[in-house]
Image (cartoon, grey):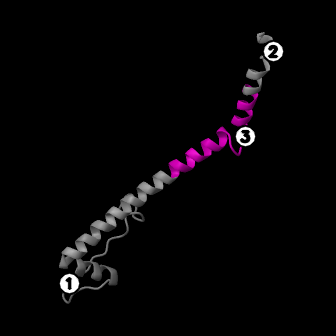
Amino acid sequence: MSLARWWPIPLLIGVAALLAGLDSHAGMRAWWDLRATLREAETERAELQREVDHLRAEADALESDGFAIERAIRERLRLAKAGETVVRLSNPETASPRFP
């Protein structure tokens, strides 16, 4: 058997690999897009997990501490007990850099 007869096979494999790599629906570009989407989803999942952990800790505090329940109700309804003075500070996101 002569090797001269088999030279088109590596060429065809190379061309097929090149076309598969450039194919926008199933090639490397699609793989990169999927990897980027996966990274974004993992970041969002981590943020949501932090929020869940925070809410779970807040719920645990509300279940175990009567003062926490009272404080949460008063903060939500913006109420104060008789004789109390309520001081409201501005939201940190809207505060001026010079005057926090």
Front one among 98 and 49: 49
Mark 3 or mark 2: name the one nearer the start of the chain. 2
Of tags 1 and 2, the one toward the viewer is: 2
Q: Quadrant of the N terminus?
A: top right
Quickly name the residue at label 2. Answer: 5
| Residue 69 rendering spot, x and y as whole percentages | 24, 79
Q: Is residue 71 above or below residue 41?
A: below
What's the residue at 76%, 28% (across, down)?
Answer: 15
- CA neighbours of label 3 inside 10 A, class few (<14), some (14 to 19), many (20+): few
Residue 17 location, quadrant:
top right
Quickly name the residue at label 3. Answer: 23
Mark 2 belongs to which amino acid?
A: Arg
Quickly name the residue at label 1. Answer: 84
Instruction: Please tell me whether mark 2 sits on a helix, a strand or a loop.
Output: helix
Residue 35 vs residue 44: left or right? right
The region drawn magenta spans 14-40
Mark 1 belongs to which amino acid?
A: Glu
Q: Is residue 97 above or below residue 62?
A: above
| Residue 2 rendering spot, x and y as whole percentages | 78, 9
Mark 1–mark 2 contact, CB under 8 Å?
Answer: no
Query: Which residue is the extreme one toward the top?
Result: 2
Mark 1–mark 3 contact, CB under 8 Å?
Answer: no
Q: Is residue 41 above or below residue 94?
A: above
The alpha-carbon separation of the residues under discs 1 and 3 comes to 69 Å
Query: Which residue is the extreme one toward the bottom?
Result: 82
